[in-house]
Image (cartoon, helix red, strand yellow):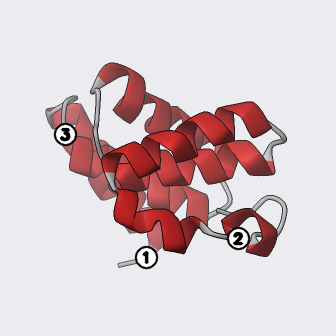
Amino acid sequence: MTPFEMIAQTTQAIAANPSDAAAYKQRAVTLCQMQQYDEAMADLNTLIDTLHTEDAEVFQLRGTLRMNRGDKMGALDDMRKVLDLNPELLQQLSGVFKTKEKGHC
């Protein structure tokens, strides 16, 4: 499936069920891969602020996007939440901001 097809499929799923957290997450990941960061951030914010997700991966992705945008405090808050939700990710997070190129998820 192409990224455009994935966007269409997940958008359709969200239209049918606005509480479909899996569809929002998949669309955010796909948008991020397509370098559509504003749209990805909007989906991540919906997952966190509206749907109240407790998915560590969602917070990690938003934290990475925030860091790449220069929002270090927002990124730190998200990464703290990642560790609250899944302390086993500490080793994986180590150095994550050093290895990411600016503008990439």
Residue 12 lies, in percent from the top left, at 25, 45
Left or right: residue 14 versus residue 58 is left
Q: Is residue 40 visible?
A: no
The amino acid beneath tag 1 is Thr
Q: Secondary structure at mark 1?
A: loop
Quarter of the image containing the N terminus? bottom left
Label 2, on which residue? 95
Left or right: residue 37 versus residue 8 is right
Query: For the residues carrying marks 3 and 1, which lies nearer the camera in this image?
Result: 3
Quarter of the image containing the C terminus? bottom right
The amino acid beneath tag 2 is Gly
Q: Earlier in the sequence, mark 1 or mark 2?
A: 1
Find residue 100 and name its label: none
Q: Residue at x 36, y 66 (%)?
A: 88
Dot 2 crowding, Cα within 10 Å, few <14, some 14–19, many 20+: few
Q: Earlier in the sequence, mark 2 or mark 3?
A: 3
As displayed, is residue 45 above or below residue 66? above
Dot 3 crowding, Cα within 10 Å, few <14, some 14–19, many 20+: some
Q: Earlier in the sequence, mark 3 or mark 1?
A: 1
Q: Residue furthest bottom?
A: 1
Real-space CA distance between mark 1 and mark 2, rounded to the nearest whole angstrom = 31 Å
Real-space CA distance between mark 2 and mark 3, rounded to the nearest whole angstrom = 32 Å
Dot 1 crowding, Cα within 10 Å, few <14, some 14–19, many 20+: few
Q: Residue at x 22, y 29 (%)?
A: 18
Q: Nearer the viewer, residue 43 or 92?
A: 92
Q: Residue at x 44, y 49 (%)?
A: 82
Q: Residue furthest left?
A: 17
Q: Nearer the viewer, residue 33 or 91?
A: 91
Real-space CA distance between mark 3 and mark 1, rounded to the nearest whole angstrom = 21 Å
Label 1, on which residue? 2
Q: Residue furthest top?
A: 50
Label 3, on which residue? 20
